[in-house]
Structure formats: C-alpha cells, structure tokens
Amino acid sequence: MANTDFHLQFQDFEDGQGFTENNQDATTVSIDDPIKSRKQRKATGNAFEEEDSDDKTELLSGQKKSAPFWTFEYYQMLFDVDSHQVKNRIVGSFLPWSGKNFAEVYLRSNPDLYGPFWICATLVFAIAISGNISSFLVNYGQPKYKYVPDFRKVTMAATAIYSYAWLVPLALWGFLTWRNRKITSLVSYSFMQIVCVYGYSLFIYIPAVILWIIPSEGLRWCSIVVALCLSGSVLVMTFWPATRADKPRISIAIISAIVILHVLLAIGCKTCFFSTYEMDSSKVHNEPSTATNTSSTKAN
C-alpha cells in the first residue's frame, strides 16, 4: 500500500524575474491592484468620452478643425463636400428668400471650392461653345461663309470668369476686413466664404448662356435680366448684413459696386461672345443690284 503521509513544508521560490529568465517558455500572470486598475480604466474611458464629445460637437455645429493654409489638409478640407450639400447650395444661389443669408444658411463655417470651381469651368465652356454655335447660326446661309471654331473664346471666357470669381472677392474681403477693424459690430466673412458665395452665384448664368444660342435679342436680354435679378439678390442679401452697420454712404457704395460688377460681367459676356446683330436679307439681296447700277453709271 502506498505511503499516504505527506510532509507539508514551506519552500522558498526564486525571484520572478530570475525564474522567467531561466524558463523562457514560462507563462506569467500579473495581478494588479484592483483600485489602481479601476482608476486607469476610468481615466481611459474619460479620454475616449472627451474625444467622442469633441467629435459630436464638431458634427452638430457643422465646423471643421482649421489647418494652416500652407498645408495640404487645408485645401483638402475645402473639397470635402458631398453632393447633397452642393445641390442645396446651388439651389440656394438662385432662389433668394427674404431674410435668409446664403452664407449663414448654406455655408456656415464650411465653405468649399469644389462647387465654385466646377461651376466656373462649366460656365467657361458653355460660353465658348454657345458663342461658336450662335455665330454659326447667324452666318448660316451665306455663300462665302465657312465655319471655323474660335478656340480663343475658351481662353477669353476663362480669363473673364475666373478673374471675376477671385479678384472681386479678394477686393471685397480686403475692404470689409479694413472696415471691420474700425467698426467691430460689422459681420465678418472669411475670404473663402466670399469666394464660395460668388462661385455659386454664377450658376444661374449657365442655363442663361445656353439660351443665348437662339438668335433672338429679346430672349437674350430677358434671360440676362432674370439671371441678374436672381443671383444679384442673393449677393445683396448676403453682404448687406456685413455693411449695414457702417455709414450709409459706404454701405450703399459697396452694395452698388457689387451689383454693377455683376451686371458688367453679364453684359460683357453677351457683347463679346455673342453676335448682337441678325443678318438682314433685304440688304443681301440689294447688294448685287446696287453693284450693277454703279457699273452701268460708270459706263455711261
């Protein structure tokens, strides 16, 4: 029968570090202080909660973290916009509602360059293509006429549209910033917000330019007036809050300059890229008879 007597003795074990060094395959289990572990978990949880709360605050307020303008993230942020926001901003750019500011309702603190860039590019090609088609329709039927597309219209239209979409907002931003330093109660807009407002305000000219293909001066002028009234109203309602606290003379001068430049752009594009005359068939038919009468007079 096996011996069942066991000798219970206390033995000294090696230090944990030495034991693990001698036994590389050994598995160690560490038991931390439960109070210390609870504090660490609580601190980690608070850090995650603070980060989540910051993200929720940014999403609810519609604001993004600003980055320096010389970094790639700054310009990437200006193109970070979805199709739903672009559609709403396009609709808001030609549907003025009384008491609604385009910058405050649609832009807030998140202007974008995606919409203005493609709106300007589309308008440039619409002007060039429509202008060439209009010239073809006006001169169609002349015996000596040969259609040659004028690619210079693309360059001229791009220079005019992009200069207006960048230089005018730059001048307006500089003036408003200067006035805001003297009168602190003025509403201030950033440069990108003003560029975004001007870029979206040009959308209404795209369908208007397409209508200019039809060789009818009455239709062209009617489309110009409608486009000017819609987009001009959006510009006036957007920038009036930024100038109304200033002196009345300066406020009226700024708003008048905004409207006048907007009108000059539309009239300039219509005058430079589209024929303002229609061929008079009676003059064409009378030219041969006039030449015949002149030659007979010289013969006599």
Image (tube, grey):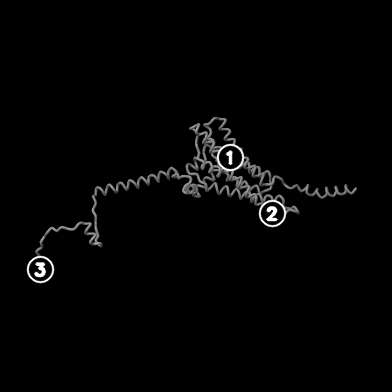
Asked if residue 65 lies left or right of residue 270, the reply is: left
Of badges 1 and 3, the one in the foreground is 3
Q: Residue at x 55, y 48 (%)?
A: 117
Q: Residue at x 57, y 47 (%)?
A: 120
> How far across and down, in percent of the image, does residue 148 sit?
69, 54
Using the rendered view, name the quadrant where residue 20 is placed. Answer: bottom left
Residue holding disc 3:
2
Dot 3 falls on a residue whose secondary structure is loop
Q: Nearer the viewer, residue 257 or 234?
A: 257
3D distance between C-alphas at marks 1 and 2: 36 Å
Dot 2 falls on a residue whose secondary structure is loop
Asked if residue 246 lies left or right of residue 24, the reply is: right
Are there few (<14), some (14-19), or many (20+) residues within 10 Å of tag 3?
Answer: few
Residue holding disc 2:
148
Can residue 238 be seen in the rendering of this structure? no
> How far across and down, in percent of the image, does residue 41 sit?
29, 49
Residue holding disc 1:
232
Are there few (<14), some (14-19), or many (20+) residues within 10 Å of tag 2?
Answer: few
Identify which amino acid the numbered label 2 is placed on.
Val
Could you tell which of marks 2 and 3 lies nearer the N-terminus?
3
Identify which amino acid the numbered label 1 is placed on.
Gly
Identify which amino acid the numbered label 3 is placed on.
Ala
> How far across and down, in percent of the image, does residue 5 sit?
9, 64
How many marks are shown on the rendered structure? 3
Q: Would you place residue 266 above or below residue 249 in this image?
A: below
Contact, CB < 8 Å: mark 1 with mark 3?
no
3D distance between C-alphas at marks 2 and 3: 116 Å
Q: Nearer the viewer, residue 298 or 116?
A: 298
Asked if residue 10 lies left or right of residue 219, the reply is: left
Q: Residue at x 50, y 37 (%)?
A: 188
Q: Would you place residue 53 above or below residue 241 in this image?
A: below
